[in-house]
Amino acid sequence: MRRLCTLVMLFAATPLCARVDFSGRWSLDAARSTGLPPGFEQGLVVEQAGDSMKVKTTLITDNGDRIVDDVYALGAGEQDVPAQFPGVAAKVSKRTARWTGERTIEVRDHVEGDSPNGPLTLDIARQWELSADGKALVIEQDLNNTGFSNHSHRVLTQSAASGAPAPVRTARMFPVDLQVPVPPTPFRAGGKTQLVYEVHATSLRLGDLEWKRLDVLDGDGRELASYAGEELAALLTRPGIASIAAPQRIAGGTSAVAFLWFAVEGPAPATLRHRATFGIPASATAADRAVEGAVVAVRAPALVLGPPVRGGDWIARWTGNGSFHRRGLMAVDGGARISQRFAIDWNCVTRDDREWNGAGDKNEQYTVFGKDVIAVADGVVGRVVDGIPLNQPGSMNPAVTVGIDTAAGDSVSLRLADGSYALYAHLQPGSIVVKEGQRVRRGDRLGKAGNSGNATGPHLHFHVSSGPGLEGEGMPYVFDSFTVVGTEEGMPEEGKWKGKRNEPREVHGELPAEHMLVRFAGE
């Protein structure tokens, strides 16, 4: 009896060793971990007070982000806890957490419920161990999902980040759909070959992406163009999103469209391919992912046309990569297209630089009003719209309700030899002298410039597309010849054209640039 009491007294006099505190911010060291999918990242924020631990886990994979807030009640026995597994309707969700040593704990979860694939039983066992120096946390995790098991070895550290950017990782199965809906047709402008088209990126990921870089390569891998940062952001629009402060940030199930317009030296390449680099905003350490694809064949060079008007002087407006024509992605008959991709709004000035006289509140005061529009090539009249009233200059309220059949106003769509259509829009009602099905020759008069349809002032809207009116996809074209006589430097003031004239310079086989003042043959 005396010996037993002595042992009890000795045991009571021996203090228990202090258990460790797991508190801190922990990040996965992927190089020292095993059994995890490519690109997997894990972060833990642990707040411990005695036997109670609040654990916030951030899980990141190529396919999505997941944040889980847990509480581990160590030594409290089995407890009911919320099930935090996407797509699982849990009927049973229990957890047991306990100390297994001075530096180790064990957490076991058991979940029963229904998933989209049927009944589910999930058992997860996690063994935590803190290193002697407190700088590494090792988690051995065993998962059994309705008979299928997985083991992972995870090493997490609290060491400071090196600051060096992680290398970009090419991810062939990264959930982004990269498409070029309309391959480019090369054309000449500014003395160089131009390539103009769009790259659509749709995220299929459960979590946000950030589009960081876009590289355009030829078939041999030579870089033709590259965009990043603010330069890339300026090229992007977000279909279906009215306004967005960060256009490069793409939520799951949404798209971004990059509007490209760049020049290449010499002839156009036969093929193009694209490398898009994406970051994961929720990630603190994961490498950016690069997706390579959207390989397209470059089309044959653009049509060569005659002028749509005679003489001059004519101002080319609302063309270029930032114009509303260029970015006019519209859904017509269930398809999103840009019929006005290469549209130009043409206005006319006199030789003494008058765009209009008087107050500019009457159509007849404008130099362009009543000018003849002519066939750019031999063709067949494919569509005629007539009888739409003229608008009041400066008014934002068109004389008719604007829709797919009225937006171009009184108009002629001329079907060209290759099947494309040249559109002459916003003409004067009653001025059109051709009928549908009529054959015309290059230079034949079609009608007179006006101010009908979706227009706020007299001008000629001209474009070429694969369909009549505002249907089809916009196609580039060049004029066989024109003369550059000046450059616009601002909008007119009291009807006076604002710009600088230069010595006439003849140009052949090019598309005029925005703000050019040009002169065509005739008159």
Image (cartoon, grey):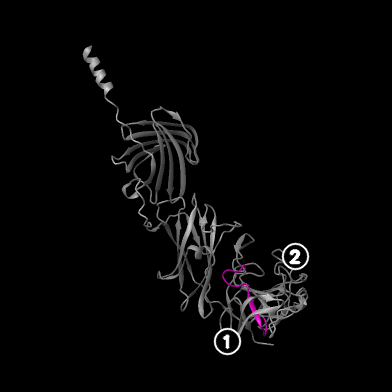
**Is residue 265 shown above or below 216?**
below
- Quarter where residue 95 is shown: top left
Q: Position of residue 508 (x, y in %)?
A: 56, 84
Q: Nearer the viewer, residue 448 or 26?
A: 26
C-beta proximity under 8 Å, tags 2 and 1: no
Q: Nearer the viewer, residue 319 or 515?
A: 515
Residue drawn at (23%, 17%) of the image: 6
Write down the residue under mark 2.
397
Q: CA distance from mark 2 to mark 1?
A: 40 Å
Circle 2: is it few (<14), some (14-19), or many (20+) Cα within 10 Å? some
Amino acid carrying label 1: it is: Arg
- Quarter where residue 17 is shown: top left
In terms of sequence position, does the residue under pointer 2 or pointer 1 come before the other?
A: 2
Using the rendered image of the protein, determine whether residue 422 is visible from the camera's viewpoint. Answer: no
- Of the 4 image quadrants, the one containing the C terminus is bottom right
Q: Nearer the viewer, residue 456 or 486?
A: 486
- Residue 240 among magenta residues: no
Amino acid carrying label 2: it is: Asn
Q: Position of residue 16 (x, y in %)?
A: 30, 27
Residue drawn at (46%, 47%) of the image: 65
Q: Magenta residues?
A: 309-324
Q: Position of residue 353 (x, y in %)?
A: 68, 82
Using the rendered image of the protein, determine whether residue 286 is visible from the camera's viewpoint. Answer: yes
- Which SS class for mark 2? loop
- Which SS class for mark 1? strand
- Quarter where residue 511 is shown: bottom right
Write down the residue under mark 1.
505
- Residue 322 among magenta residues: yes
**Is residue 336 shown above or below 39?**
below
- Of the 4 image quadrants, the one containing the N terminus is top left
